[in-house]
Amino acid sequence: MAEEVKLIGMWGSPFSRRVEIALKLKGVQYEYIDVDLTNKSPLLLKSNPVHKKVPVLLHNGKPIAESLVILEYIDETWKANPILPQHPYDRAMARFWAKYIDEKCLPALWNACWCEKKDREKAVEEANVGLETLENELKDKKFFGGESIGFVDIAANFIGFWVGVLEEVVGVELLTIDKFPILCKWRDEYVGCSGIKENLPSKEKLGAYFRTRVESASQSE
Amino acid sequence: MAEEVKLIGMWGSPFSRRVEIALKLKGVQYEYIDVDLTNKSPLLLKSNPVHKKVPVLLHNGKPIAESLVILEYIDETWKANPILPQHPYDRAMARFWAKYIDEKCLPALWNACWCEKKDREKAVEEANVGLETLENELKDKKFFGGESIGFVDIAANFIGFWVGVLEEVVGVELLTIDKFPILCKWRDEYVGCSGIKENLPSKEKLGAYFRTRVESASQSE
């Protein structure tokens, strides 16, 4: 029986895109099913009844949710082009930083973009703490994964691409070259990198999507 | 050179105890260093500069933080008595549930114990959602790991032991047999299980520790 791989995702979600990047890096063929998050499909609700969120990977009908969990599954299932390093200590460091990105950096960056204007200065300061920590971690490496894209780089796709789009739409400065020269260099390498650039949403489409959100927020204030 | 394993922990922390349980299950000899979290030691601050939290595992001087990351490291480094299952899908499920426990169940349970009295009913309802989800997941299994203790059981140690102590101290009902008969059966098996029971704090000491906290909270209200 041929292997069946399906991904339930949402085109503008950095979490869905993590999984797409990983599948493409591995050369795994898959069917992509885009869902409307304002009207969740029965397939999504059945496949991820706990969180009801994208992404969900369906491998021969068996569902796996949570993007970082899916990345580990992909790396263990299809061995070509490893995403995680080989040595247990390096693997632990990769897991540590991906967790840090999800639990500290992303919520702080998101809040800095979407909080009320009066709270913005403090929110940007908090986001800067996370970015500075990543700047120090990256130091003289090309990618978090070393010479090539790895687990942490994939987890950091929001910082590599989404943040720039949001900065323009919302009118906030976050990842600036004077404050974070190393991360900015990483971002440029990252979004230009084969395997990443083809798997990011259109900047215009994503910008328009967020712009609608800004407008509806300003109308409800 | 002999292997050097040290654990920086805090006796009453369920996260530190996860690591102790895993090391004991694996039969790894280690030196335990208890820290006072109100006066953090230079060793802790140097070993986990990002979060400044316990537990930190030091393996031949190299630090690893975040309890679930440490559990994976231990499982990859010392192969005896696996903590995670073998098959990638089962491994993904274990990671999914451990993440669910950390991100949904523990914050909700903690909040149900420590919120203001006026907010308690709602907080208990929210905690019940997490417990019900785990009850459904456990179903007819003895442990989350099947016939023996695994990754999710270790991650759930707060539910197996700490919740009971907190219920008594705070005077709140959470893990009751009428609502969660399966989880209660699991809890009884779990805390009585060799490898777990020797690695839990003293009920009296933990109760006294939390009681001091309740008293200081009531004085500040």
Image (cartoon, coloured by chain):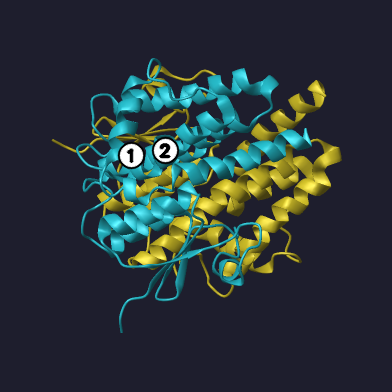
Chain colours: A cyan, B yellow
**Residue at the limit of the structure toward the right, as seen here:** B118
**Residue visible at 66% across and 62% down in the picture:** A39
**Residue at the limit of the structure toward the left, as seen here:** B1
- Write down the chain letter for disc 2: A
For label 2, the crowd category at 10 Å Cα-Cα, with few meaning under 14, some 14 to 19 and many 20 or more, is: some
Label 1 element class:
helix
Query: For residue A81, which quarter of the picture?
Result: bottom left
Q: Is residue B156 visible?
A: no
Nearer to me, A157 or B115: A157
Question: x, y percentage for residue B8?
Answer: 40, 31
Find the distance from the CA under tag 1 to the CA under tag 2: 7 Å
Q: Circle 1 is placed at which residue position?
A: A191
Label 2 element class:
helix
Question: x, y percentage for residue A203?
Answer: 45, 42
Whether residue B71 sits left or right of residue A165 in the image: it is: left
Residue A172 to residue A201: above or below: above
What quarter of the picture does the N terminus of chain B occupy? top left
Nearer to me, A91 or B114: A91
Residue type at mark 2: give it.
Answer: Phe
Question: x, y percentage for residue A167?
Answer: 51, 29
For label 1, the crowd category at 10 Å Cα-Cα, with few meaning under 14, some 14 to 19 and many 20 or more, is: some
Residue type at mark 1: give it.
Answer: Val
- Write down the chain letter for disc 1: A
